[in-house]
Image (cartoon, rainbow, N blue to C red):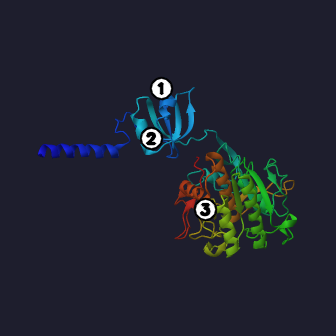
Amino acid sequence: MLIRISLYLSLLTLFISSALSGPTGLRKRVDIQRYTGDGETSGRHLVLLKPGASREGVISQLANTVDVVYQWGTVCNGFAAVLDSVSLQLLQSLPEVESIEEDGIMRTMGTVTQSDAPWGLARLSSKTKLADQDASQLNFSYIYDSSAGSGVDIYIIDTGVNIEHNDFGGRARKTDDNGHGTHVAATAGGTQFGVAKAATIYAIKVLNAAGYVDIHNDSGILSNAHSIDRIGATSDIIAAMDYVAGVFKEFKRPTVVNMSLGGGASNTMDTATRNLVTAGVHVAVAAGNDNVDAKDTSPARVKEAITAGASDITDSMASFSNFGEVVDVFAPGKDIISASHLPTLKPSKSLSGTSMASPHIAGLIAYLIGLEGNQSPADMQSKLKKWALKGNLTGVPPGTANLLAHNKQG
């Protein structure tokens, strides 16, 4: 009797062990190779079969829910698929399988070094403080991937853009009779001055030199530029966001909005900004230039947007920059050289403000989309913070994230 009980318990233990170990309890023949790059994967697995093995035969043993994305039969014998744990265990046991590995994210090796860049671009691709501290020069090196924001649309809600400036190379739309918008746009996507040099720039003009005008008459208004004092109406800016949301809904192209503007708290502005991000549009905004906590500034206080504070060439928080918990990341914003709206008289000019920091971030978002493909605004915000240099800035108050934007080059 004791023998029978012991045998029964042994068989029961074996049954439970087999049930928990996998679909058949077959011996594992191959291990799953983990991706050894920067850790990012597509969520798929690459299954390499031995020469002569039947792909169709192997795939037919998998569950119908398995998503086979690719099959290869020329350069190698195998397939790529989204596999659940049961299917992975089965494949590990099959004698036809040569190897299984995670589908890692690869990046282009077409790194470019620009030697006539402003210091703000150079800081994005440098892991340390710049040795040259002369912000007036255009002899800094900016290292970037050659994808450079290709296929991405950047909307500059501002004073317009001088489309004749050669820094845009025909990639910009709308005129500018103030200068702020052209400077901002070139920082985001200019050929010499810009982060995402291959992105397409669209300017929604919400301010002109005369002040308040109706956005429906192809113009409008803006506020908040360090050293440029203009007044703005929230309604015009919301109308601009509404327009972008409609275009994005129709065409679904990767889209970034830069708003180097702001003012007092506005629930309507905040709601419009939040909903634009929720729809899938990436939004970069200026923190403001009053050296105060940005918690009462709209749209800077919208947590779904990416709010940029300003740094200077010495790796200090700029003296004018707003701060606080709502500031997501810092970027160069003091003494920034970029395109002038009067290129025949003066092709470039220097401005300061969080208005200058924000387009560095907008351009960096476009750059990352061109490099890795589009992703949700929430994931992009997390990635910018992950890639940022941590603790490099001086003068950052407690409660403000000490993060300096970086493009993971250099």
Please name the residue that numbered disc 3 is placed on.
330
Q: Which residue is mark 1?
A: 53
**What is the secondary structure assignment of the residue under circle 2?**
helix
Residue 281: x percent and y percent? 67, 58
State the residue in front, 362 or 183. Answer: 362
The residue lying toward the viewer, choosing from 181 and 36, is 36
Amino acid at dot 2 = Ser
Among the 4 quarters of the image, the one containing residue 71: top right
The CA span between labels 1 and 2 is 18 Å
Label drawn at residue 87: 2
Figure check: 59 above or below 160: above
Is tag 3's residue or tag 2's residue first in the polypeptide sequence?
Answer: 2
Q: Is residue 199 left or right of residue 371?
A: right
Classify residue 71 as left or right of residue 282: left
| Residue at 86% from the left image edge and 56% from the top image edge | 345
Task: Name which residue lies at 40% across and 40% down.
Answer: 89
Residue at 69 percent across and 56 percent down: it is 256
Task: Indicate left or right for 336 with 163 as reference.
Answer: left
Query: Mark 3 or mark 2, which is nearer to you?
Result: 2
Instruction: Return the residue found at the far top.
Output: 52
Q: The residue tagged with tag 3: helix, strand or loop?
A: strand
